[in-house]
Image (cartoon, coloured by chain):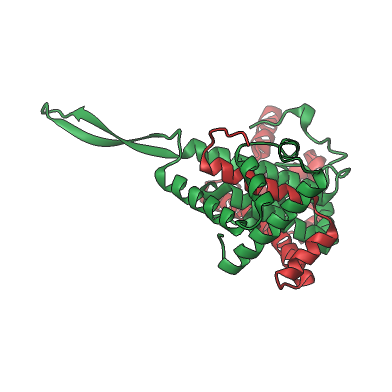
Chain colours: A red, B green
Amino acid sequence: MPQKPQSYEEELAAIMNTLAETVAEASDEDILSEIQEEGENPTEAAEHVRNVLLNATRTYRQRRLWEAQRQYETHISTMKQKTYNLPATAVEQRKLLDSILSRQPALRPAVLTAQFRDFETLSDADVESYLKQLQELGVLDEFSECEDEKK
Amino acid sequence: MEKKLSRRVPDEKAASQDEIQAAINSLTSAELLRLKGFAHFKIRGLRQASQGRDWEDLLQEACTATLSGDRRWNKSVSFERYLIDAMRSISYAWRKKFERDEVSFVPEMRQTAGGEEQSILLSIPSTVPGVERVSISKQELESIEQLFNKDPLVLEIIGGLRSEMTGPEIQEALGITQTDYETALRRMRRTIQAAASKNGSGI
């Protein structure tokens, strides 16, 4: 048998990788009988593997939810710490939001969601929150500039 | 690393997350056990490059990479086959990263501010496995060969694999058919599996 210098690690890897490929090509019968020879129940052993995969999907989804939640909380926290240039009273804030929605009707569906179809049903806190978000988006500044130009 | 657009599975052929979930639930017992067996031997082939990861980690990594979009399952290929290909690729990447990141410590003489010579240890990228890794691999190879000291054909095949011979080359050198070769490999696999089950993690 021809010999070629190779590290022990590479030799071991060559053996194990070859055996891995034999598993990939093994028939269903061989795979199931080998598990039985090892004293395991094939159905139970297989379900354990399925659970490994399902756990991967659950963990992935949870991680994404956690990340989205974390980003939302960071965003809210940032908003709370910022100084917003809003009218002083709830009445004036409501008038401002109403004006903005009248001038920019495209924003109306985003503000008046299925939950709050009627502008009057928005609470004072909701109105303030929407105005802050609109300021974040720069809409408030654009609106103020337009109003200034008209004067 | 950016994926080459020409090799990326097109959107219309790539499975959605719901389709991946459905595929997992549809895998048969034999397919699931093949995935486990394949992952098990790939991890064993990695040795220290596995860095403590086991077959479950390899299989989960293949699944997670698919869910995240790092890898895409082309639905024209069976999900089992796709996961096997993904694990093949991931285990190769793990090995390469391990080899890149491994360092050796070498002494170097440096002069201090006071003009004295001082020996310090530097870490440099290693180009060869350390003594401990070599010893562990050597021992495992010897243990495997001992399992087959009454099976000369398997010992010959092991010798061929250690010499980087391919399956056809081994068959020609030994004058055996492909069926004989595959039967011997099956015997080898079952014996090594049984020894591993008996002894715990390693052989």
Q: Nearer the viewer, residue B16 or A138?
A: B16
Q: Nearer the viewer, residue A72 or B101?
A: B101
Q: Nearer the viewer, residue B10 or B202?
A: B202
Horizontal side of residue A81 vs A122, given as left or right: left
Residue B121 image-quadrant placement: top left
Look at the image and tell me in which quarter the N terminus of chain B lies.
Answer: top right
Look at the image and tell me in which quarter the C terminus of chain B lies.
Answer: bottom right
At which x and y percent is residue B51?
52, 51
Q: Nearer the viewer, residue B171 or A40?
A: B171
Horizontal side of residue B139 vs A52, given as left or right: left
At which x and y percent is residue A52?
70, 62
Mark count: 0
Horizontal side of residue A16 vs B138, given as left or right: right
Horizontal side of residue B107 vs B165, given as left or right: left
Residue B105 image-quadrant placement: top left
Residue B33 seen in the figure: yes
**Can you say whether A120 is above or below B84 in the image?**
below
At which x and y percent is residue B122?
31, 35
Measuring 22% from the left and 30% from the top, which residue is drawn there?
B109
